[in-house]
Amino acid sequence: MSLRVAILISGSGSNMEVLARSMTGDHPGRPCLVLSNNPDAGGLLKAQKLGIPTAVVDHRDFKGDRGAFEKAVQDQLQKWRPDFIALAGFMRVLTADFVRIYEGRMLNIHPSLLPKYKGLKTHARAIAAGDIEAGCTVHEVTAALDDGPILGQARVPILAQDTPETLAARVFQMEHVLYPAVLRRALAGERSPIMLP
C-alpha cells in the first residue's frame, strides 16, 4: 500500500515535477494532490499533464487571515487524505496549528545550508558573507521558520565569478537530486540525514 503524498507549490513546480516523477515502481509513495496558493502557478498545468489532481486556495482571498487560509488548505487536503506533505516552493509561512496536524510528516526544501540563511535571498547572503560553499537542505517542517530536523543537504562550491543568479542555478540542479532521495527515505521511515555530494 503506497503512502499518499500531497505536494504544495506556489510557482513553476519544477521540484514538484521531479518528486512526482520519482514516485513510481517500488517507491513507497504516490502523489495524490498538487495544491497551490497561486492560481497562476505553472506547476498546476504540469501536475495536470502528469494526471495528478490539483487544487487552488488563493491566499489573497483571505486578506491576511492566515487561520482562515490554512483552514481552507486543510479542507482541500482532507478530501485527498495525504499521509505526507512535501512543500516544494510553497511561499507561505505556516502556523504552528497547521504544522501540528502533520508533525513528522511534512518536508520542505530550502536553498541554503541550514541553519545558515533562513528566509529569503539566501544566495546573495552567502556570497556577501564570503562563504566558499552553498547548497540546499531538506528538513522536517516545524513551527519555526526554516527549522526542524535536517534530513539531507547538498553542497556546491561558490565560484569567484558567481552572482546570486548563477549560484542559484547550480543549487537548483542539486535540489532536484536531493529532494527525491530524501522523500523516498522519509516515506520508508529512514530519518538519518544524507549529505551530497
Image (spheres, rainbow, N blue to C red):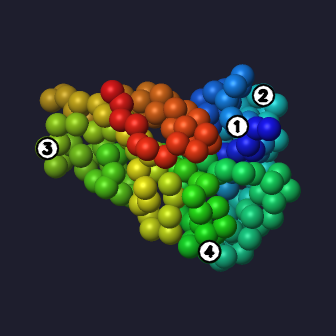
Measured along the vertical axis of the image, is residue 160 above or below residue 79? Answer: above
As drawn, the label of residue 97 is: 4
Mark 4 or mark 3, whichever is nearer to me: 4
Which one is earlier in the sequence, the residue at label 4 or at label 3?
4
Do the residues bearing badges 2 and 4 touch, measured as CB atoms within 8 Å?
A: no
Q: Residue at x 59, y 63 (%)?
A: 103
> Badges 4 and 3: C-beta atoms under 8 Å apart?
no
Query: For mark 2, what is the residue?
Result: 49
Q: Quadrant of residue 194?
A: top left
Relative to residue 167, is residue 68 depicted above or below? below
Q: Is residue 29 above or below residue 124?
A: above
Query: Label 3 sits on what residue type?
Result: Gly
Q: Amino acid at mark 1?
A: Gly
Rendered-image quadrant of the N terminus: top right
- 37 or 173: nearer the eye? 173
Tell which circle, 1 or 4, labels the residue nearer the N-terminal end: 1
Q: Are marks 3 and 1 in contact (CB under 8 Å)?
A: no
